Image: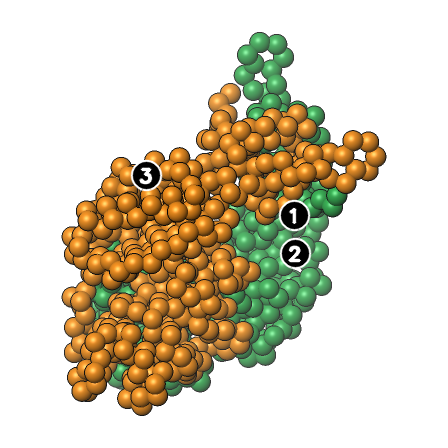
Chain colours: A green, B orange
Amino acid sequence: MAVSPRTPGAGEMFQLLRDGRPRTRAELATLTGQARSTVAGRIDALMATGLIAPAGEATSTGGRPPATFAFNASSQAVLGVDLGATHARLAVTDLASTVLAELDAPLAIADGPGPVLAWVAETGHKLLETAGRSAADLAGVGLGLPGPVEHATGHPNNPPIMPGWDDADVPGILRSHFDAPVLVDNDVNIMALGEHRIAWPDVADLILVKVATGIGAGIIADGALRRGAQGAAGDIGHVAVPGAEEVVCRCGNVGCLEAIASAQALAARLREEGLDVAGPADVVALVRGGDVSAGRAVRQAGREIGSVLAATVSLLNPSVIVLGGILAEAGEHLLAGIREVVYRRSLPLATQHLRIAVARSGAQAGVLGAAAMAADHALSPDAVDALTA
Amino acid sequence: MAVSPRTPGAGEMFQLLRDGRPRTRAELATLTGQARSTVAGRIDALMATGLIAPAGEATSTGGRPPATFAFNASSQAVLGVDLGATHARLAVTDLASTVLAELDAPLAIADGPGPVLAWVAETGHKLLETAGRSAADLAGVGLGLPGPVEHATGHPNNPPIMPGWDDADVPGILRSHFDAPVLVDNDVNIMALGEHRIAWPDVADLILVKVATGIGAGIIADGALRRGAQGAAGDIGHVAVPGAEEVVCRCGNVGCLEAIASAQALAARLREEGLDVAGPADVVALVRGGDVSAGRAVRQAGREIGSVLAATVSLLNPSVIVLGGILAEAGEHLLAGIREVVYRRSLPLATQHLRIAVARSGAQAGVLGAAAMAADHALSPDAVDALTA
């Protein structure tokens, strides 16, 4: 009479409370279909973890008013980390994505995993302190890296702009500094998670496209991030662009989208045209200042990106495409180029309700997405069951 | 004290029984965490619908051996319908995809929704009779159409090869013939559902590509079919192929993949070269007979399809790509062309474990996928709750 051991437990009941609304024991018994005594025991177990707390009394319908219980999002904290090629952003949030402390600093990812992760650990601990929390309060760490990450292991896989990081045991290294689960993903996926959570929580099908040093996409389909079999989904930067076979990409292939239309590629092209451009920020500044060549170059990059996004629209039929990364700050030129090609190249059914917009969550998207990834993991039914077992 | 009315009911308990294993009341109480009395009541309600039935006695550990209950897949039937441009396939299956009766017939989709759906209704009723089932046994109808279908309404949307079908109320018309829910999807999605169910049930991320009169894909990600916001996902036939801007597609755009690499396009090209080719079947016959021009043309079509699939692999990181449709029957040439480009154009992380194979479920995939779509709908927790309420 072998029976699977998995019984809907405290973790599943807790999911009902994650919306923050206070509920009575009787309401929870009705919602879960569990006996009052079972519910009472699970409430006690959840109270012991601190994840829920008493939230006053409900209105009585006669007799003693019943006690209510609610998600206690401030009981623990998570650390979100968003590492780019040349900068880092860290945030300590509570379990409901409220930012408690935040920090932005220059950082060279090319220094390699040892120095970079040591810095992350030290800075993370300091930031926890700033937030008034101790290391014991930490429920998880979420980290985004600017390159492909194998999701199952959290190891970078041949990341083109991260020398020394290939197959590094990032979760293992960080676990030696933090006594909490560590989740690692690429920078675009955490940005998609953050933008979706902050700005488009009710949209089921969304593509976030980051145009910066590289180009990549994060895919939300049916409400959840889709990473694919190895966590490599969304890698549109290395899709071939027609007619660009002579351009060699840092990945070793030719004609890749990001070798032609990334902020880095545009900076190089404008430099060749004699403009005073050191990097992506200068491209944005030139466009905003009304420079015609720069504006034209960004619009053309939009068309190239649009040609790949047109295929993406045909394949995934999203209702929203959101543009992020530094080149999205160049204003309407990028959007205009993308829209021009996407609306020309896709079937009516896929574009009639399609919105293409610039990300609303700004520079915080990645770090908040990383923190949310860690919080979601810590608050999953299995994790809460383990805490209350 | 407003409480959401949704309580885990008989429908949710029934999901545990869908694997077909007999279980006792005590096992179900343990698995669901519900009280024995609650479980007993739900078993009675499910028995009354016929969805479960007594399945003998479990081994006793002393005392009277407890009764067991199991999913009774033969209690009802579903009708699956797979309509192509020039043929139809119908199957009556039980609720666990066992085929009870099947029929294959020529049918011109271009005759329009009135005549075609009247024929489907008449033939469907006859096939139910052949299967020894009555109209009252019918739990649902699943229908696949060879064109874009808006999933929420079940209406075709500007289908290029289905004159007269645009915005036709297909579910409404069929509901006047069948007293059961009608679900409509495009032919490639039902084929992906069928192939996934039959041949790759344990693969979470799979793309099915159908290469026939048209070209389309069905996307399984994280174990489920992803249809996108309007149900238009997977429409790779109208992605632009580089260097083919002079080829006009039936969709009105230029350079579309299916205008260049579909079985129809190949047949036309080989005809121009003076070969005696009336349609796709002749292309397959020529390739199988060793005709060099035909083999070369199919391999080149594989490369064109491969260029779009390389982008698909970068975007979705599937672990399996399955090729279906009549051109997949032409043997290794199509596969070879596709593999050549996909493995050249995608990043190592996405291709190191990627398999590209011909569909295993053959011509049955679509009709069984359509039937499975109807059965899944009929057996969903909400549907079963409604039956037992």
The amino acid on which the numbered mark 1 sits, given as a three-letter code, is: Ala
2 and 3 marks on the same chain:
no
B304 relative to A173 in the view: left or right: left
The amino acid on which the numbered mark 2 sits, given as a three-letter code, is: Pro
Indicate which disc residue A118 carries. none
Outermost residue, bottom direction?
A: B292
B290 relative to B159 in the view: left or right: right
The amino acid on which the numbered mark 3 sits, given as a three-letter code, is: Phe
Indicate which disc residue A383 carries. 1
Tell me how far mark 3 sits from mark 1, CA to CA. Answer: 47 Å
Foreground: disc 3 or disc 1: 3
3 and 1 marks on the same chain:
no
2 and 1 marks on the same chain:
yes
Dot 1: element: helix
x, y percent for residue A52: 63, 35
Tell me how far mark 2 sits from mark 3, CA to CA. Answer: 53 Å
Q: Residues within 10 Å of mark 3 (few under 14, many from 20)?
A: many
* The one of B20 and A62 positioned closer to us in this rendering: B20
Indicate which disc residue B178 carries. 3
Q: Residues within 10 Å of mark 2 (few under 14, many from 20)?
A: some
Question: At 49% from the left edge and 60% from the top edge, which residue is drawn?
Answer: B198
Q: Residues within 10 Å of mark 1 (few under 14, many from 20)?
A: some
Dot 3: element: loop
Tell me, yes or no, whether the two marked residues, 2 and 1, touch with CB atoms within 8 Å. yes
Q: Which residue is mark 2?
A: A181
